[in-house]
Image (spheres, rainbow, N blue to C red):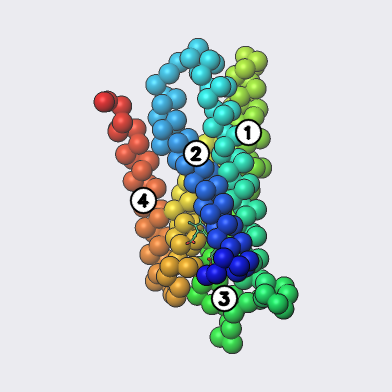
Amino acid sequence: MALSDLYSNCQLLLRWIHVMAGIAWIGHLYFFNFVNLPFQGTIGADIKKVVNPQLITRALWWFRWGAMATFIVGLLLFTQLYMYIPGVGFGATELFSNEQGLTGRAIWILLGMTFGTIMWFNVWFIIWPAQQKILRGVRDGVPADPALPKRAALTSRVNTYLSAPMLFGMLSATHYGAINFVTGVVTIALGLFAIWWAYQTAPKVGTSI
Ligand code: HEM
């Protein structure tokens, strides 16, 4: 890649921002599910009132803006790689499709992007609005609708489960390529199992030094 190769330089920059933002987003998702959830069970309402508005609002900021940046830059990356032909213009590239139809790479990334987009939607339109109401309730001493914490927790759990198969989709597009029914099912199953294992392990570890 020459330094003057604008296309490659843009792509690397987009990839880097995308993965940095993805780390911020999914890192906080795992913090909420594997650290904060077991932790909240060990503290009383008086401590929650002091700790949570300060801690959770900060974590939620990185979480939701990480999600937004990952999503937007992911779409830009998709457009550059799959929907733009340098010197020609916008349109499906050979990475996206050929005479046989969609390429393996395109199927992987579409799988990952579908999971990622559902997760982004959940963050912005379910988890964050619910958390805002819950935290305002804690701050003002007015209990929020009891359905809200359940909705937020369930959606957060769904996102956590989706995150592992989603990442297989992101990585396999470039680093694996071919896809068939078995590889698709195995990666989804392995991803779901890894997250299930983390939920089982989370309350039991890290409490002693
Ligand atoms: C929210 C929706 C998302 C969209 C639309 C999206 C889109 C994309 C696209 C188009 C690529 C390039 C694939 C290729 O080279 O063929 C990619 C790669 C990648 N994405 Fe995403 N992505 C999303 C979410 C995420 C999340 C949450 C993460 C978590 C860290 C992530 C991590 C990655 C990684 C690690 C790569 C591979 C980078 C590489 O191997 O160079 N993505 N993504």
Q: Is mark 1 within 8 Å of ligand 1?
A: no
Q: Secondary structure at mark 1?
A: helix
Give the labeled residue for mark 1: 130
Disc ID at residue 95: 3
For badge 4, the amino acid type reads Ala
Q: Residue at x 59, y 87 (%)?
A: 99
Badge nearest the viewer, 1 or 3:
3
Asked where in the image residue 96 lies, by quadrant, the reply is bottom right
Q: Is residue 180 left or right of residue 78?
A: left
Badge nearest the viewer, 3 or 4:
3
Query: Looking at the image, is 115 positioned above or below residue 199?
Result: below
Which comes sooner in the sequence, label 1 or label 3?
Answer: 3
Badge nearest the viewer, 2 or 1:
2
Query: Looking at the image, is 51 positioned above or below residue 191?
Result: above
Q: Residue at x 61, y 24 (%)?
A: 135
- For the residues labelled 4 and 1, the Cα–Cα distance comes to 27 Å
